[in-house]
Image: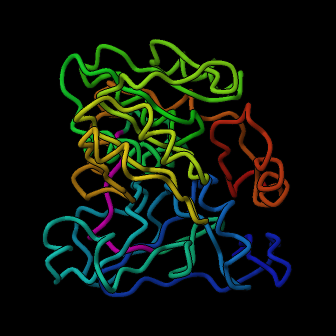
Amino acid sequence: MRAAMLNDKHELEVTDVADPTPGPRELVLQVTACGICGSDLKLRPAMRAGLVMGHEFCGEIVASGADTDARWRLGGHVTALPVIGCGRCLACLAGEPAQCDQADLVGVGGTPGAFAEYVHLDQRETVALPDSLEPALGALVEPLAVGLHAVERAHIHAGDKVLVVGAGPVGLSVITWAAQSGASEVVVSDPSAARREAALQFGATRTVDPTDEALEPRYDVVIECVGLPGLTDVCVGAATKHGHVVIAGACAKPDPYVPIPAVMKELTVDFVVYYTRREFFSVVDALGRGTIDAAPFVTQRVGLDGANAAFHALTDAKEQRKVLVLPELG
């Protein structure tokens, strides 16, 4: 099969690799679409050569192992958690495979990901997509689950004032769910005019340019969705007394802040990653019922041959939301 593989210069190079074969309880998908995630952009320089990235995927079942359930029929359209736990530990039994000590992170250093024509996955983490959903939009389940997890961990109450810091893809996912949470305000802070405009389309009640307007310390819930140094301090400053700060951005550099303001306000601070199985499956249910719409997230579709250029362009392309890689496009 063709796959966009990392070479020794950390560029995505389309090459031929062996087709995956399913284990006894595994499925093989023909990839319909795979989204480019912000974490892909951050992690690519640190990833090993020869890795096939891509963890926001969906596809059609083309092969199944001998011990898979009968419900997984060839031709079915599915997506899956890109985190394969051991299935036996307390975290897995609680539906939190991302917290499994043996977790296999698909496309993020573990099993080959879905910037390829085919990908194999564990049936335990697989979920069927609704017939009403455009097949390629199944790739949005994963980033929508990231946002849902952050919002659920925020415990937003009716009437709460919510601030979302950052209106990139994760921020837009958080806004989507926060807008349905009963909050009286969902204010979004982002220096990009294009992203502020997108935030309003996704349910923000107001936007703020942080380079032009100071954030007042009045928010019951503050959710950080960028992952850059300095923003934890910004979030602490914007939270009101007894407020709740949720850090969903993946910052890989030191982020010093002065704790005393958080102490004096008696803030609760949560750091979140991935999602639970329940949350992932809930996103599929919401898409099937039409309570959320994945289509507005997608701003570009490219083939495998265009994946490397898309990675480079996304570094500075603030007008982009989600770029999907569709192997069928070449």
Which of 113 and 211 lies nearest the eye of the viewer? Answer: 211
The answer to whether residue 48 is above or below residue 79 is: below
For the question of whether residue 282 can be seen, the reply is no
x, y (%) of residue 10? 80, 75
Which of 58 and 61 lies nearest the eye of the viewer? Answer: 58
Q: Residue at x 46, y 75 (%)?
A: 105
The answer to whether residue 152 is above or below residue 278 is: above
> How many labels were placed on the picture?
0
Which of 269 and 194 lies nearest the eye of the viewer? Answer: 269
Q: Residue at x 58, y 49 (%)?
A: 230
Q: Quadrant of residue 179?
A: top left
Is 19 positioned to the left or the right of 44 in the image?
left
x, y (%) of residue 92? 20, 74
x, y (%) of residue 165? 51, 35
The answer to whether residue 17 is above or below residue 14 is: below
Magenta residues (range): 121-130
Image quadrant containing the C terminus: bottom right
Q: Residue at x 68, y 19 (%)?
A: 212
x, y (%) of residue 182? 24, 19
Is 280 positioned to the left or the right of 69 in the image?
right
Is 140 positioned to the left or the right of 306 in the image?
left
Q: Quadrant of residue 150?
A: top left
